[in-house]
Amino acid sequence: MVDFMSDQGLAAWKLPLIVAGICVSIVGAFYVGGPGIGMAEGSLVAGIIVVMAVRHPPLHPIVPPPPG
């Protein structure tokens, strides 16, 4: 049996900050270095996201909570 609310993982307020950090770094790279550096930064960020997803898979099955 999976306990649905025991581990919340990442706090909800941190997610917009992570997305903003990703967006600001990519837009900043486009502004400073042009399309080449911006695309390189975008691919670097995408690669980091993939590596983090592979290294930290979900610990429990992802299932919806039972109806209340």
Image: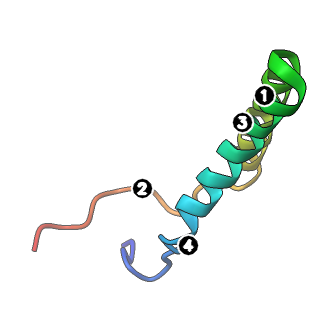
**Which mark is in front, 1 or 2?**
1
| Residue type pointed to by label 3 | Val
* Foreground: disc 3 or disc 4: 3
Callout 3 touching callout 1 (CB < 8 Å): yes
Q: Residue 31: name its quadrant.
A: top right
Q: Nearer the viewer, mark 1 or mark 4?
A: 1
Determine whether label 4 and label 2 are within 8 Å by CB.
Answer: no
| Element type where label 3 sits in the image | helix
Q: In this figure, which residue is indicated by the disc labeled 2?
A: 62
Residue placed under numbered mark 4 in the picture:
9
- Residue tagged 1: 30
> In the rendered structure, are the residues bearing label 3 and label 2 in contact, judged by CB atoms less than 8 Å apart?
no
x, y (%) of residue 18? Answer: 64, 58
The residue to which callout 3 is attached is 27
Residue 30 relative to residue 19: left or right: right
Quadrant (top left, top right, bottom left, bottom right) of the C terminus:
bottom left
